[in-house]
Amino acid sequence: ITPTAIAENICLFIRSNLVAEGIEVTPSTPLTRIGLDSFSLIEIILFVERQYQLQLPADALTQENINSSETLAHYIYQYL
């Protein structure tokens, strides 16, 4: 699995579960720009942990790590 594949998987989850239909979500889209709140970000982290069977450390939720699906994917990739 690659960071790109992880980012696409996160985007698919966001499109399917967290944003209104028609909202464009790409790996580089800033997550706060599409209206995601802290609860949505927690849902994304829980999805990732289930999907990739890992436990991210508490410090995973920094602005740097969760700016976009792409930055989150690169962070997650370190733990696989």
Image (spheres, rainbow, N blue to C red):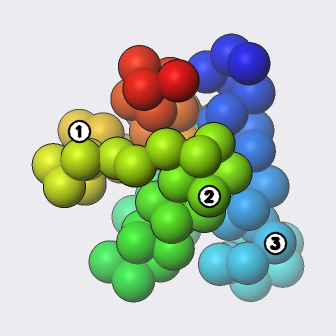
Please rate how many residues cluster around mark 1, counting C-alpha atoms within 10 Å: few if below 14, some from 14 to 19, many from 20.
few
Mark 3 or mark 2: name the one nearer the start of the chain. 3
- Res. 29 visible in picture: no
Q: Is residue 59 left or right of residue 53?
A: left
Toward which corner of the image does residue 12 lie, by quadrant? bottom right
The mark total stands at 3
- Type of the residue with mark 2: Arg
* Location of mark 1 (residue): 64
- Reading the image, the residue beneath label 2 is 50
Disc 3 crowd rating (10 Å Cα; few below 14, some 14-19, many 20+) is few
Amino acid bearing label 3: Ser
Q: Is residue 7 above or below residue 21?
A: above
Quadrant position of the N terminus in the picture: top right
At x 75% / y 27%, what residue is drawn?
A: 5
x, y percentage for residue 29? 55, 46
Identify the secondary structure beneath mark 3. helix
- Label 1 residue SS: loop
The reply to whether the C-beta atoms of the residues labelled 3 and 2 are less than 8 Å apart is no
Q: Is residue 33 above or below residue 61?
A: below
Q: Nearer the viewer, residue 50 or 44?
A: 50
| Tag 3 residue | 16
Name which residue lies at 15% across and 49% down. Answer: 59
Residue at 68%, 51% (x, y): give it. Answer: 51
The quadrant in which residue 9 appears is top right
The CA span between labels 1 and 2 is 22 Å
Residue 9 visible from this viewpoint: yes
Please state the horizontal and vertical placement of residue 57, each as a whole percent of the image: 24, 47
